[in-house]
Image (cartoon, rainbow, N blue to C red):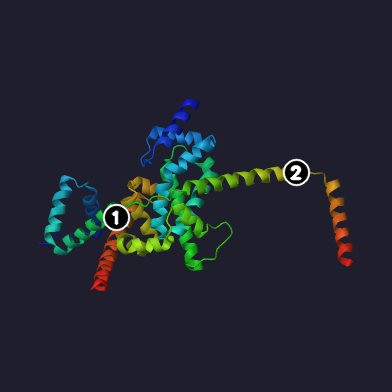
Amino acid sequence: MRPEHSYQEEEKLFTDAVDGRLLTESDAKWRALLESSGEVKARFDRYQKTVARLKEAPKPKAPPALAGIILRRVRRRRSLSRLEATAQVDYRIPVEAFIPVLLACAVAAYFYLAA
Amino acid sequence: MGLESMELTRAMEESDDVRTDVPEASEAQLVARLRAGEPAAFEIFVRQYQDRVWGFCVRMLADEEEALDVVQEIFVSIHRAFDGFRADAKLSTWVYRVAKNHCLNRIKYLKRRGKGRTREVGDVSEGELAAASGDVARPDESLERDAAKDLVHRALAELDDEQRAVVVLRDIEGLSYDEIAAVTELAEGTVKSRLHRARERLGEILTRLESDDTIKGD
């Protein structure tokens, strides 16, 4: 007689089996499940093989110069941030001086373009 | 503190192998130095984590050129946001979370724009990638060459993005379930469920790819 099991139960057993965490009680249940159905056994064999292949897959190493690229980029960002902070300080010029200068530039540009 | 920092820096510089498991004390020291804003600490951090972040991004994006872009963005984001890092959280978990979010955002961007994206200012040139990898061949050609042999890589590329993330984190990067839950901000039960479905789906894809390759080989 084929033992009844839910998908959730099968999921838990598959995961525990692959993780090597089957307890004695689950172990007996697990063996019964595998022995009862060729389909379940075939599914588990494929499942186990998939996990094994994943664990054996070579881990790509970072390109040798990657760290240098990252650090240069971070340093560039840091310099830009400092530059922006400095520029903000420089922009604190009196409005009474800034607006007439701006107006003068606008007038000069107008006459230049008109000519 | 100064002497400990020098010893840590010297140890990291002398070590040729990047250790993937950082002892808790070293991680705490590194976090303290990063919080203090030491430039040397950030370099140590990059060298210590670059392999893991690179490997994760390559698997998620299935494209070394995209991975090169995204890995840089990840480390820049981390550098910018480090003040917000809670010291009670695990550094590696946080790094993977930032990496996962960047990868998923990039995947969405690429799907919206199509694979052949327009080059933007600041993009890494192919020459720079070749120089970075020390590989004369174009990275996509090199990847294509290996992909023929690497069925796992091809199968992962066909998986749903969220499923791919949990499979890579668990079965390739070796994170525990609670770490993956912290990275993905999902309940542990959901992680296990998603992982189980992903593994089953991956098994089907691998079977199909193997059978396709066998037919082509005949």
Which kind of residue does numbered mark 1 sit on?
Leu
Give percent across and percent down for residue A1.
9, 62
In this rendering, would B154 be left or right of B109? left
Earlier residue among tags 2 and 1: 1
Quadrant into which the C terminus of chain A falls: bottom right
Q: Label 1 is found on which chain of the structure?
A: A
Q: What residue is at 24 percent from the left and 73 percent from the top?
A: B215
Measuring from the top left, give residue B154's x and y in whole percent.
34, 63
Question: Viewer-proximal residue, B169 or B5?
Answer: B5
Q: Which mark is residue B19?
A: none
- Position of residue B125 measured from the top left corner of the image (x, y, whole percent): 52, 59
Q: Position of residue B45 (x, y in %)?
A: 46, 41
Horizontal relation, residue B156 to residue B98: left or right: left
For label 1, count other residues whose C-alpha is less than 10 Å away and answer few (under 14), some (14-19) or many (20+).
Answer: many
Chain letter for mark 2: A
Disc assigned to residue A90: 2
